[in-house]
Image (cartoon, rainbow, N blue to C red):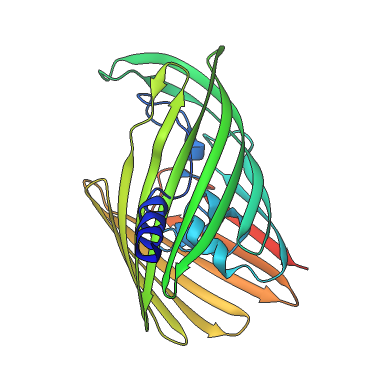
Amino acid sequence: MESLLYKGRIICCFLFLCCSCFAKDYRDTALWLELFSPKAAAMGEIPLADDPLAALWNPTGLLELKGDKLSFLHKQSPLSIGTYAFAWGRNSLSIGALNWGSSQIAFDSFGNSLGDAKVEGRALFLGRALRVYKNISCGISVLSCDQDLAGKLQRGGSISLALAGSWGQWELGLGARDIIGKLGDDPLGTKLGFRITYRLEELTVATQWQRQDLHLGGEYALSPQVRLRLGGIFGDMPRYFWGIGLVQSGWQLDFAWRLHSHLPREFTAGGGYLF
């Protein structure tokens, strides 16, 4: 009986990861899809996080929460309009809200231009992580949203899942993003990602394979208060990132920039406070 319950929990926890909801066939019109945490963005958009906003990218990271923590996130880009998120978390549970927007050219599934399309959306999300067995953990994220695409209101939501296991300094992660989801009349396609992380006392390196792209990233603790990060995404067009994290007296501030970006003033900033 115990063996059956254990297997059941493992199967259930496979159904997990950071949650998001996006217009299926519109390219670059829902920029909040790229709203990664500054830490994740600087490390090549690899979803390593230990704050309440982890529910959006990797809910297993909620297990790292110690006490009550409030987090925020903002993305600055010439194409973004009010793209930010807030979340509160405690003991592996997180609840939050996010807002996103953009104004640019939209395309349909055949690549035909739909003209200039202003997009604005709002969402509420809930994340939960569980330790199912010694070194095995799982997480689930549920999101409900509505989006205004060029005057057309779309409502939807999604469920995403994550599973992680750690063995000494190694950690393996598997995520299924939007395993169940819909926005307006469009179903959301599930996106799978596989992650490998290696941690030392002062250095963390990670790699992830997702959507035929290879993500590589690293973080070095220059001191207990300062962390430096570098990352890259290697696919059709390589992209490179860097960032810095600052920790002091319960406060945490993180920043990330994309190197050689064609968009001026593009960066992601975030932070939090541990009560």
| Residue 158 rendering spot, x and y as whole percentages | 48, 35
Quadrant (top left, top right, bottom left, bottom right) of the C terminus? bottom right
Residue at the right extreme?
275
| Residue for point 33% across, 32% down | 189
In the rendered structure, the answer to whether residue 132 lies left or right of residue 254 reads left
- Compared to residue 23, the image places residue 273 above or below, namely below
- Compared to residue 170, the image places residue 84 above or below, namely above
Closer to us: 262 or 229: 229
In the rendered structure, the answer to whether residue 96 lies left or right of residue 33 reads right
Res 81 quadrant in image: top right
Residue at the front extreme?
1
Closer to us: 177 or 104: 177
In the rendered structure, the answer to whether residue 104 lies left or right of residue 240 reads right
User: Is residue 45 at least partly visible in the picture?
Assistant: no
- Compared to residue 158, the image places residue 132 above or below, namely below
| Residue 259 rendering spot, x and y as whole percentages | 41, 57
Closer to us: 9 or 60: 9
Instruction: Count every numbered label the image shows and give the total.
Output: 0
| Residue 141 rendering spot, x and y as whole percentages | 52, 46
| Residue 69 rendering spot, x and y as whole percentages | 71, 63
| Residue for point 25% across, 47% down | 237
| Residue for point 26% across, 45% down | 211
